[in-house]
Image: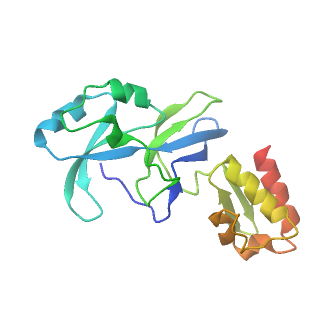
C-alpha cells in the first residue's frame, strides 16, 4: 500500500458526496506513523485499529507504517490500546494546525443519512459535496461553512479581495465565477447545494 500525495493543503475533514446514497457525508483523513522497528510490525499487522502498509515515502525511503482511520475508530479506543514501546496515541492524533500539508488521500467516509462507514480514497474535487459548474468550469468548497462563505462572497456587491478578514480560499476564486453576469446563477447553484 502506498499513500498518494496531493499538492494542496486540505482541512482534516471534508464534506463529500456519500458513495452509498449521494447525500452529504464527512471524509476524515487517516493519520500515519512510521514503524521503525521490525519487531513492532507484527502488532500493527494484527491490530483491528490499524492498517499496516509498506512503501516508499516522498523522499524515496522504504518505510513500514501504521494507518489509523479517524471516523472509523475513536481516539479513546486508541488510548486504551496497549501499543508497542515507544508508541502512544499521540502518534495518530490530528495536527493542531487547521490545514494539513499536502499528503495522503487515505481516509474514512461517514454518512449520517445511510449509515455508511468505510475506508475511502479521496478523489478531490470529484468527491466534493459542495460543487457547482458554471459554463464548463467547477467551483467547490471543502465544507458547509466554506460553502456559505463562498455563496455570501459571490453574491456580495462589494468584494474587496484585499480584505484581511476573508479566508484565503476566497482570494483564489477564478474571475469566471465572479463576473457580473455569473453572480446570479452561481449564487443560485450554491444556495441549492446548501439546501
Q: Nearer the viewer, residue 114 or 44?
A: 44
In the figure, is residue 115 to the left or right of 79? right
| Residue 116 image position (x, y, % from top left) | 55, 30
In the image, residue 179 above or below residue 64: below
In the image, residue 12 above or below residue 71: below
Residue drawn at x 74%, y 56% as measured from the top left: 149
Q: Quadrant of residue 68?
A: top left
Q: In which quarter of the image is residue 177?
A: bottom right
| Residue 152 image position (x, y, % from top left) | 81, 58
Residue drawn at x 24%, y 30% as measured from the top left: 83
| Residue 8 image position (x, y, % from top left) | 50, 64
In the image, residue 93 above or below residue 146: above
| Residue 18 visible to an observer of this rendering | no
Residue drawn at x 67%, y 38% as measured from the top left: 23
In the figure, is residue 170 to the left or right of 74? right
Q: In which quarter of the image is the C terminus?
A: top right
Q: Nearer the viewer, residue 147 or 176?
A: 147
In the image, residue 91 above or below residue 100: above
In the figure, is residue 11 to the left or right of 49? right
Residue drawn at x 69%, y 66% as measured from the top left: 170
| Residue 155 visible to an observer of this rendering | yes
Amino acid at each position: 500500500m502506498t499513500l498518494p500525495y496531493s499538492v494542496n493543503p486540505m482541512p482534516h475533514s471534508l464534506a463529500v458526496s456519500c458513495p452509498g446514497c449521494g447525500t452529504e457525508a464527512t471524509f476524515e483523513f487517516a493519520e500515519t506513523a512510521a514503524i521503525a522497528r521490525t519487531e513492532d510490525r507484527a502488532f500493527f499487522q494484527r491490530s483491528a485499529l490499524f492498517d499496516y502498509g509498506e512503501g516508499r515515502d516522498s523522499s524515496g525511503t522504504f518505510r513500514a507504517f501504521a494507518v489509523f482511520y479517524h471516523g472509523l475508530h475513536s481516539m479513546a479506543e486508541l488510548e486504551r490500546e496497549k501499543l508497542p514501546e515507544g508508541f502512544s496515541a499521540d502518534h495518530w492524533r490530528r495536527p493542531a494546525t487547521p490545514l494539513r500539508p499536502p499528503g495522503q488521500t487515505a481516509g474514512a467516509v461517514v454518512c449520517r443519512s445511510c449509515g455508511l462507514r468505510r475506508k475511502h480514497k479521496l478523489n478531490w474535487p470529484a468527491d466534493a459535496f459542495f460543487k457547482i459548474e458554471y459554463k464548463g468550469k467547477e467551483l467547490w468548497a471543502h465544507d458547509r461553512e466554506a460553502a456559505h462563505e463562498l455563496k455570501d462572497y459571490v453574491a456580495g456587491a462589494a468584494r474587496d479581495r484585499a480584505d484581511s478578514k476573508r479566508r484565503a480560499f476566497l482570494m483564489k476564486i477564478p474571475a469566471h465565477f465572479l463576473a457580473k453576469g455569473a453572480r446570479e446563477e452561481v449564487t443560485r447553484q450554491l444556495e441549492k447545494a446548501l439546501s
